[in-house]
Image (cartoon, rainbow, N blue to C red):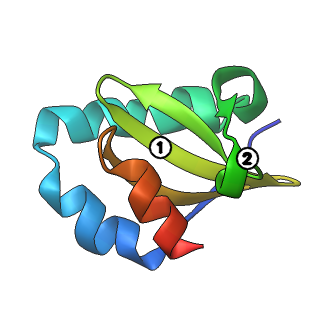
Amino acid sequence: MTYKVGYHPLVKEKDLSKINNPIKTRIKNAIEKRLMVDPVKYGDPLRKTLKVYRKLRVGDYRIVYRIENEYIFILGICHRKEIYKKAELRI
């Protein structure tokens, strides 16, 4: 089953503008080849305030997302040091 992907408005405005092109390509490939194919298999569940979300590792970057039926909502794409703080603020 193929999933549809949606993004938080700040992902394209702020998150992706700070990432260089080779890493953007890796992130795009990870979304297309892993998340859209089987988000439960490739992502790990988060805990505490982000417990309804999951994360996908792409090098030092993390994609935080939530699965709703056939739809994946991406909350943030950032470096591992800052993603969880930003994700909590965006809920």
Q: In this orientation, which residue lies closer to the viewer: 44 or 22?
A: 44
Residue type at numbered disc 1: Ile
Badge 2 density bin: few <14, some 14–19, many ≥20, Cα 10 Å: some
Q: Residue furthest right?
A: 69
Q: Residue at x 42, y 38 (%)?
A: 62
Location of residue 25 in the rendering, given as x and y in whole percent from the top left corner: 26, 35
Residue at mark 2 to residue at mark 1: CA–CA distance = 16 Å
SS for callout 2: loop
Q: In this orientation, which residue lies closer to the viewer: 31 or 1?
A: 31
Residue type at numbered disc 2: Tyr
Q: In this orientation, which residue lies closer to the viewer: 22 or 85?
A: 85
- Among the two numbered marks 2 and 1 on one chain, the one whose residue lies closer to the N terminus: 2
Q: In this orientation, which residue lies closer to the viewer: 75 or 45?
A: 45
Location of residue 7 in the rendering, given as x and y in whole percent from the top left corner: 52, 66
50 horizontally vs 82: left or right = right
Location of residue 29 in the rendering, given as x and y in whole percent from the top left corner: 41, 31
Q: Residue at x 66, y 40 (%)?
A: 46
Badge 1 density bin: few <14, some 14–19, many ≥20, Cα 10 Å: many
45 horizontally vs 15: left or right = right
The residue that mark 2 highlights is 3
Q: Residue at x 29, y 41 (%)?
A: 81
Location of residue 61 in the rendering, given as x and y in whole percent from the top left corner: 33, 35
Q: Of the numbered discs in the image, which one, if any, rests on residue 22?
A: none
SS for callout 1: strand
Compared with 35, 86 (above or below) is: below
Q: Residue furthest front?
A: 48
Q: Quadrant of the N terminus?
A: top right
Q: Nearer the viewer, mark 2 or mark 1?
A: 1
Q: Of the numbered discs in the image, which one, if any, rests on residue 63?
A: 1
